[in-house]
Image (tube, grey):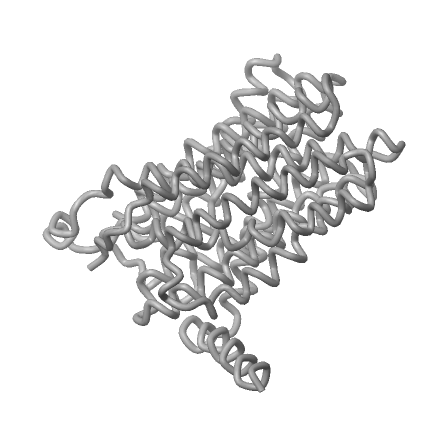
């Protein structure tokens, strides 16, 4: 009886999203955010192949990630003041120029110039996910629709985090590392431009000066959600490297990608069902539960790191809390966004994820290499524990107008 009444409720919640934004909106945002998951890995492969040095390739990938972490909030700041359409179209053009600069540097310049060019590629990489969430803040009048939209966005993020690197690998194998980066450039040109021109951009028109000043500044308390995103990014990076190290011990590092992809299954289910949770289960409480769940998942992965089948089950359990954590932190942060500041705030959260992935991958990879995969998962545990702890200081006041 309960299933009969719950299923239509769940479906009806998500059916409202195409009614608000149009039937092509969510597929467009999904394809438009693929490049942001492809570029660091594609840069790594291209620079490694061109220079013959994995170390130089790793530095170039890190430079692209740092450039992205710095550039996304800058682009978001301009988008709040100039409108998303103009800023995104400009950034697409600058990104293509930066890619041309990287290809030129690989053939004619030394390592410092290559690293600077890679940083430029990351700096000009548009964050469709952040801009899309900022649009929902302006498009959706009902807070329940915002929550549902953020759950859908979180599910799309999970899918692109899996599909983007897989696409880089497939194109790299069938073509070349250069072809993978050019594929990302093509996706950016077509789908980010289409997203910029989608009719929903009208909801992101900049506020008049007086209204913008009246809306106020982004409060300093947004540092807590940014820290939460840093923790989640660390979970992503450390889990990827830990699972890869575990797969390598059984003779096939490529199996690590398949094991890690299992996390998306549990994450998708719990994220989509998140909209059915009662309001009395507060965002702070959800935040704490997700952090503790990630901590438990890390412990389970460490215990079975030497058995790949059992590790896949533990990764599935971890995934149950990943998507809900993303949605919860994003939703709470959205409540802190003054009118007309959404793109900048969502961009800050994206930067937290990017820096966290780099932190988790480097720290988890180093521990896994020197002490075994189980120690790599210790970084996941630390990030989960910190995420749970920050729930106590997560701001609850709604400043949106």
Q: Position of residue 314 (x, y in %)?
A: 70, 46
Q: Position of residue 98 (x, y in %)?
A: 52, 32
Compared to 111, does 391 lie above or below? below
Q: Is residue 91 left or right of residue 260?
A: left
Q: Is residue 229 left or right of residue 77?
A: right
Q: Is residue 202 left or right of residue 351?
A: left
Identified at 51% across, 74% down, the residue is 23
Q: Position of residue 320 (x, y in %)?
A: 60, 54
Compared to 31, does 394 lie above or below? above
Q: Position of residue 261 (x, y in %)?
A: 71, 49
Q: How many numbered marks have been drawn onto this rendered protein structure?
A: 0
Q: Which of the pair 31/143 is nearer the observer?
A: 143
Q: Is residue 92 left or right of residue 222?
A: right
Identified at 38% across, 47% down, the residue is 346
Q: Quarter holding the C terminus?
A: bottom left
Compared to 12, does 320 lie above or below? above
- Is residue 104 visible in this depiction of the protein? no
Q: Which of the pair 241/103 is nearer the observer?
A: 241
When asked about the image quadrant of residue 40, the answer is top right
Q: Quarter holding the N terminus?
A: bottom right
- Is residue 395 visible in this depiction of the protein? yes
Q: Which of the pair 5/188 is nearer the observer?
A: 5
Identified at 23% across, 41% down, the residue is 219
When asked about the image quadrant of residue 47, the answer is top right
């Amino acid at each position: 009886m309960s299933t009969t009444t719950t299923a239509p409720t769940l479906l009806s919640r998500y059916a409202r999203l195409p009614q608000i934004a149009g039937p092509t909106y969510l597929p467009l945002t999904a394809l438009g955010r693929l490049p942001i998951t492809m570029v660091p890995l594609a840069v790594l492969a291209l620079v490694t192949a061109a220079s013959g040095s994995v170390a130089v390739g790793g530095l170039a990938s890190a430079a692209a990630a740092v450039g992205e972490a710095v550039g996304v909030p800058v682009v978001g700041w301009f988008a709040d003041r100039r409108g998303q359409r103009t800023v995104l179209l400009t950034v697409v053009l600058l990104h293509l120029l930066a890619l041309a600069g990287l290809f030129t540097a690989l053939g004619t310049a030394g390592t410092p110039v290559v690293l600077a060019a890679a940083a430029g590629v990351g700096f000009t990489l548009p964050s469709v996910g952040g801009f899309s969430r900022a649009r929902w803040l302006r498009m959706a009048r009902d807070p329940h629709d915002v929550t549902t939209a953020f759950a859908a966005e979180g599910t799309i993020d999970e899918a692109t985090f899996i599909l983007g690197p897989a696409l880089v690998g497939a194109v790299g194998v069938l073509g070349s590392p250069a072809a993978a980066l050019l594929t990302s450039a093509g996706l950016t040109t077509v789908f980010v431009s289409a997203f910029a021109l989608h009719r929903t951009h009208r909801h992101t028109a900049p506020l008049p000066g007086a209204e913008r000043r009246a809306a106020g500044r982004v409060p300093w308390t947004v540092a807590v959600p940014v820290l939460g995103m840093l923790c989640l990014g660390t979970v992503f990076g450390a889990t990827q490297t830990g699972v890869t190290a575990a797969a390598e011990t059984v003779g096939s590092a490529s199996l690590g990608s398949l094991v890690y992809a299992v996390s998306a299954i549990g994450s998708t289910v719990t994220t989509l069902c998140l909209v059915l949770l009662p309001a009395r289960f507060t965002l702070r409480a959800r935040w704490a539960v997700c952090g503790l769940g990630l901590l438990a998942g890390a412990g389970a992965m460490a215990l079975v790191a030497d058995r790949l089948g059992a590790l896949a089950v533990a990764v599935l359990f971890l995934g149950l809390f990943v998507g809900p954590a993303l949605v919860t932190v994003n939703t709470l942060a959205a409540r802190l966004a003054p009118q007309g500041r959404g793109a900048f705030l969502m961009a800050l959260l994206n930067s937290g994820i990017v820096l966290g992935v780099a932190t988790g991958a480097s720290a988890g990879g180093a521990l896994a290499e020197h002490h075994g995969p189980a120690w790599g998962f210790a970084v996941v545990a630390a990030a989960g524990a910190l995420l749970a702890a920050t729930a106590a200081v997560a701001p609850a006041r709604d400043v949106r107008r």
